[in-house]
Amino acid sequence: MSTSEQIIATLRQIGTPEKAAHLSKFFKTGKGEYGEGDCFLGIPVPETRRVAKAHVDTSFEDLHILLESPWHEVRLCALLILVERFKRKKTSEVEREEIYHFYLKHTKRCNNWDLVDLSCPTIVGGYLLNHTDRSTLYRLAEGPLLWEQRIAMVSTYTFIYNRQFDDAIRLAKHFMTHQHDLMHKAVGWMLREIGKRERPVLSAFLEEYASRLPRTALRYAIEHYPEEMRKRYLKMGKE
C-alpha cells in the first residue's frame, strides 16, 4: 500500500456521516454555491492535522495523488503535510523552494477558503517573506480563479505579522471592487491585522478608502476600533 493509500484509508476510518453532512452545509457545497460538488468525509481539522504530522515526509508524487482527491479532508491533509514540512527547522531552503513551487502548481486544488487559509500564509507568505520579487502574488490576484485571488490576499498575513504592510495595502486596493463576499472578508481580515500592529497605517488607509470598501470588508477592518470611530467609518462607508 502506498503512502497516499495509507493516508486515505486512515482518514476514511476517522470520518463520520454526521460530521460530513454538517461540513457540506458549512462549506456551501450546494448547486451554485462556492464549494459546489465538494465531498466531505466528516473529519475535524485537529484530526486531519494529526494524520498530516504523522506523514510529514510523504513524497511529492503521493501528495499530488492526495491533492487530486475529490475528498476535501484528503486535500487538506496534503496541504497540512506541506505546511508542516515547510516550517520544520531541518527543512533546507532548497526544499522550501520545491514546496513553494509544488504548491503553486496545485492552487486549483486549494478550492475552498479553509484550504487556502491553512496553507498559503506559511508556504507562499513564508517563502516570499525574504524575497523582493513578489510578482507571483499579483499574477494570482489578476487571475480568474477566486481561490488564487484569496491566496494572494491571505498570503500577506505573514508579511503583516513581520510588519511589512505594503503588499497587503496594495492588494486590498486591488480587490476593493471584487464581487465575492469571500474576498471582502479576506481584505477586511488583512486590514484588521494591520491595524492590530500599526493602527495609524490602517487609519490612513480608511480615511481615503472607507467609502469605497465593501461593507463586509469595512466591518472586519474596524473591528478593534472604539465604537465612536467604528460608527464614523461606517457612516463614511454609507456615503
Image (cartoon, helix red, strand yellow):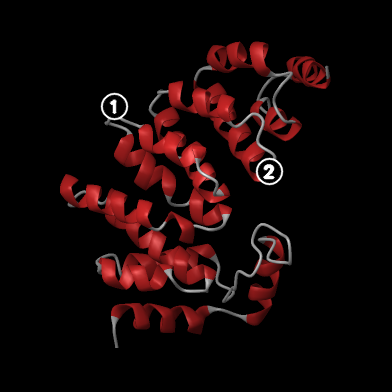
**Which residue is pictured at 64% across the width and 74% down the height?**
20
| 42 left or right of 219 in image | left
Q: Which mark is residue 132?
A: 1
**Which residue is pictured at 37% across the width and 43% down the height?**
124
Q: Position of residue 61 (x, y in %)?
A: 28, 71
**Which residue is pictured at 32% across the width and 36% down the height?**
128
Q: Position of residue 88 (x, y in %)?
A: 25, 51
Q: Dot 1 surroundings within 10 Å: few (below 14), some, or many (20 or more)?
A: few
Q: How many marks?
A: 2
Q: Which residue is mark 2?
A: 180
> In the image, is residue 181 above or below residue 3?
above
Q: Position of residue 99 (x, y in %)?
A: 28, 53
| 193 or 64: nearer the viewer | 64
| 225 left or right of 44 in image | right
Q: Where is the C terminus found, in terms of image quarters?
A: top right
| 201 left or right of 100 in image | right
Q: Secondary structure at mark 1?
A: loop
Q: Where is the N terminus found, in terms of image quarters?
A: bottom left
Answer whether residue 165 is visible to the viewer in this image.
no
